[in-house]
Amino acid sequence: MERGGRAVFLDRDGTITVERGHITRPSDLELIDGAAKAIRNLNSAGYLAVLVSNQSGVARGLMSEEDLAGIHAALEELLSAEGALLDAAYYCPNYEGGSVPGFIEDTSCRKPDTGMIEAARRDLGMDIASSFVVGDQITDIELARNAGMPGVLVMTGKGARAEARARERGVAIARKARDLREAVAWILSLEKGGR
């Protein structure tokens, strides 16, 4: 894991993997077509690819943190098989509507709060002003706004619903993309145009 530089903060479900509600087993993971190639392109361009994912299934008692670690290990294997690498993975297991003690009190890590971004900045020392958030939910776009980064909305997963909510709430979307591949292509095109 390299320190410093630019990052693209990536949501998991509906952005990298097919949206299936609460994924509680590694066998439920399926990469969205082109997602691994998009992450590989970020790796090649020198961006840190950092997963940031709300995982309330832990607080709801649907899985343990050990189960979640197994799911993320499986995700890394799927990506690695296609030559792609996540530089770091952060998740928030906390949810105030949960039922598991210890996971319902402090939800400051939960998107759209910036706890996971702040942890990544401490750990990796990246330049937030040169970084992006990509996801399929309104919380991803609000996270980008709250952290001072452009937010790219992908239309896979829950993208259409998120776009409508962004309009209702007056939340600016820096770019709407068909999928992660198109989102990454746009981010990388900004280098040529001099962001």
Image (cartoon, rainbow, N blue to C red):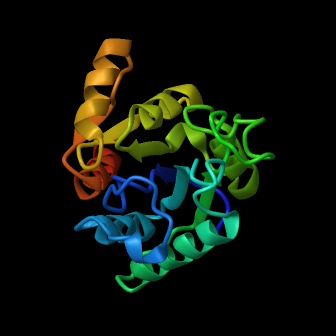
The answer to which of 151 and 24 lies nearer the viewer is: 24
Residue 67 point in image, percent of width and height: 62, 70
Is residue 188 positioned above or below 67 on the image?
above
> Horizontal placement of 188 versus 142: left or right?
left
- Tell me if I can see residue 186 in this picture: yes
The answer to which of 22 and 41 lies nearer the viewer is: 22
Residue 68 point in image, percent of width and height: 60, 66
Q: Residue furthest left?
A: 178
Residue 90 sits in quarter: bottom right
The residue depicted at 56 percent of the width and 26 percent of the height is 146
The residue depicted at 39 percent of the width and 52 percent of the height is 21
- Tell me if I can see residue 149 in this picture: no
The residue depicted at 38 percent of the width and 14 percent of the height is 169
Quadrant containing the C terminus in the rendered view: top left
Residue 151 point in image, percent of width and height: 40, 35
Residue 105 sits in quarter: top right
The answer to which of 68 and 115 lies nearer the viewer is: 68
Residue 125 point in image, percent of width and height: 70, 52
> Horizontal placement of 53 versus 178: left or right?
right
For the image, the number of numbered tags is 0
The residue depicted at 70 percent of the width and 42 percent of the height is 118
